């Protein structure tokens, strides 16, 4: 809904197909380019970045394999500058753009980059001070083309006016992206697995790990196990390193008529390295505690991190039927959350308060039972080692799959009947403990 205009007309699946095609081109030409010493065709790549960051002027310079056409706009709350490019591979460590001490006195607070959609890449610059774009263009010199983004300090009023113009342009061109996952007539329950973040939005970065990659590996493993069981239809919200807005993730769950939505994340608290263990969240208007509220707020920043303009969530007309549906859905979400906690503890560490609720935007589908798992804390060395271990991921994803089996074994007999689900946890089988 809220993503910026250009490139929004292709369906996500078409884009994914294009991505796969272009990826194989990259592989093809990378080999051939090396053999014949020719410049590679296919998507452009950015291979290095340099930041010059002063209080009045700043410059970001990306080395690119060939010239790329850049368009740009500005966004407020928080103040950002967004530069869009055709699909460009960033072969640069995402940690390079993290905030650094002293950056608050310069124009640029931090920056990130990556795919926004399969055929579109994006650079998002977080501003410490209102700034305007002097230029964003490729400077082609024979040896090394460079994408140069130059910023200059500007007034708050001028910045806000530019941000309002960007927003109007975005709204005028806003189009609905078709959902990549279609509802399938099937007797099997449909499960949507949602690896958090992706593309330009890396999520948390700590202890050498990048959240979007860790959660994608876990989600892929879990989806494969569920599919292999033959008990479910399974879809992932993203199949690669691509950004998806929170609203799009919710829409995929709803459009596919999902019976369960499981969002996968990994948390980080930079100033509390001892906090550890997995937490299972359900959606709620009221957070169970301050820590849950902080986590939801952090995860709800995903769209802002990717340079997507904030929009007021359209509140559906409140009616009694919708409230009843929401109520029933929440009961199912709670049952699954408790079941998952019970199963998880057999193989993995739990947070001291492992079942919580808060206002996660990705858990807002009123008719799809939804939970969000924070697998652990990237900021905790022990958790980080687990998250990075294929053995640990194999064991814990099996526990999640087993919890899903237990949930549907009970739900299958009550779903659609007048009987309300019981709000008690389903215990992990005794022999597995
Ligand atoms: Zn996350």
Image (cartoon, rainbow, N blue to C red):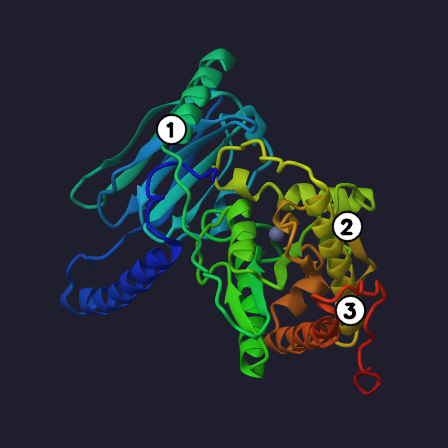
- Vertical placement of residue 49 versus 13, above or below: above
Q: Residues within 10 Å of mark 1 (few under 14, many from 20)?
A: few
| In the image, the residue with mark 3 has its CB under 8 Å from the nearest atom of ligand 1 | no
Residue 270 visible from this viewpoint:
no
| In the image, the residue with mark 2 has its CB under 8 Å from the nearest atom of ligand 1 | no
Helix, strand or loop at mark 2? strand
Distance between mark 1 and mark 2 Cα atoms: 36 Å
Work out which quarter of the rendered image holds the C terminus and state it.
Answer: bottom right
Location of residue 124 (image quadrant)? top left
* Label whose residue precedes the other's in the sequence (1 or 2): 1
- Vertical placement of residue 288 versus 310, above or below: below
User: For mark 1, what is the residue?
Assistant: 172
Q: Are marks 1 and 2 in contact (CB under 8 Å)?
A: no
Furthest-front residue in this view:
418
Q: On the rendered structure, is 278 left or right of 66?
A: right
Residue 308 has which mark?
none
Distance between mark 3 and mark 1 Cα atoms: 45 Å
Helix, strand or loop at mark 1? helix
Judge by depth and name the residue closer to the eye, 1 or 68.
1
* Label whose residue precedes the other's in the sequence (3 or 1): 1
Residue 253 visible from this viewpoint:
yes
* Label whose residue precedes the other's in the sequence (3 or 2): 3
User: For mark 3, what is the residue?
Assistant: 339
User: For mark 2, what is the residue?
Assistant: 357
Furthest-bottom residue in this view:
431
Location of residue 254 (image quadrant)? bottom right
Distance between mark 3 and mark 2 Cα atoms: 15 Å
- What is the total number of numbered labels drawn onto the structure image? 3
Q: Residue 11 location, x and y as percent? A: 36, 53
Q: Residue 58 location, x and y as percent? A: 42, 27
Residue drawn where x is 17% and y is 57% of the image: 39
């Amino acid at each position: 809904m809220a993503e910026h205009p250009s490139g929004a007309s292709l369906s996500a699946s078409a884009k994914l197909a294009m991505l796969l095609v272009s990826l194989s081109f990259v592989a093809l030409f990378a080999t051939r380019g090396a053999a014949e010493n020719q410049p590679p065709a296919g998507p452009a790549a950015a291979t290095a970045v340099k930041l010059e960051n002063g209080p009045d002027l700043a410059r970001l310079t990306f080395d690119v394999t060939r010239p790329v056409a850049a368009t740009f706009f500005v966004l407020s709350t928080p103040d950002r500058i967004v530069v869009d490019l055709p699909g460009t591979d960033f072969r640069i460590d995402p940690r390079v753009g993290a905030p650094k001490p002293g950056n608050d006195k310069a124009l640029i607070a931090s920056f990130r980059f990556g795919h926004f959609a399969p055929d579109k890449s994006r650079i998002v610059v977080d501003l410490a001070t209102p700034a305007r774009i002097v230029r964003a263009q490729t400077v082609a010199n024979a040896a090394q083309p460079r994408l140069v983004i130059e910023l200059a300090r500007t007034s708050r009023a001028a910045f806000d006016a530019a941000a309002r113009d960007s927003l109007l342009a975005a709204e005028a061109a806003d189009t609905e992206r078709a959902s990549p996952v279609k509802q399938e007539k099937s007797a099997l329950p449909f499960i949507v697995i949602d690896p958090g973040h992706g593309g330009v939005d890396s999520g948390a970065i700590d202890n050498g790990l990048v959240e979007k990659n860790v959660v994608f590996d876990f989600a892929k493993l879990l989806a494969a196990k569920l599919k292999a069981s033959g008990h479910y239809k399974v879809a992932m919200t993203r199949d690669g390193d691509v950004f998806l807005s929170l609203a799009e993730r919710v829409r995929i769950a709803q459009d596919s008529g999902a019976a369960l939505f499981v969002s996968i994340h990994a948390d980080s608290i930079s100033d509390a390295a001892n906090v550890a263990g997995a937490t299972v969240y359900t959606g709620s208007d009221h957070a169970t505690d301050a820590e849950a509220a902080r986590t939801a707020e952090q995860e709800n920043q995903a769209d802002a991190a990717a340079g997507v303009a904030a929009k007021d969530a359209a509140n559906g007309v409140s009616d009694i039927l919708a409230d009843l549906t929401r109520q029933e859905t929440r009961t199912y979400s709670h049952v699954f959350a408790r079941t998952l906690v019970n199963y998880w503890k057999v193989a993995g560490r739990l947070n001291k308060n492992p079942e919580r609720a808060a206002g996660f935007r990705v858990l807002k589908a009123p008719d799809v039972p939804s939970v969000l798992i924070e697998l652990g804390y990237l900021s905790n060395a022990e958790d980080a080692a687990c998250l990075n271990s294929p053995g640990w991921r194999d064991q814990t994803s099996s526990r999640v799959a087993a919890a899903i089996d237990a949930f549907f074994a009970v739900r299958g007999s009550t779903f659609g009947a007048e009987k309300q689900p019981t709000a008690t946890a389903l215990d992990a089988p005794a022999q597995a403990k």
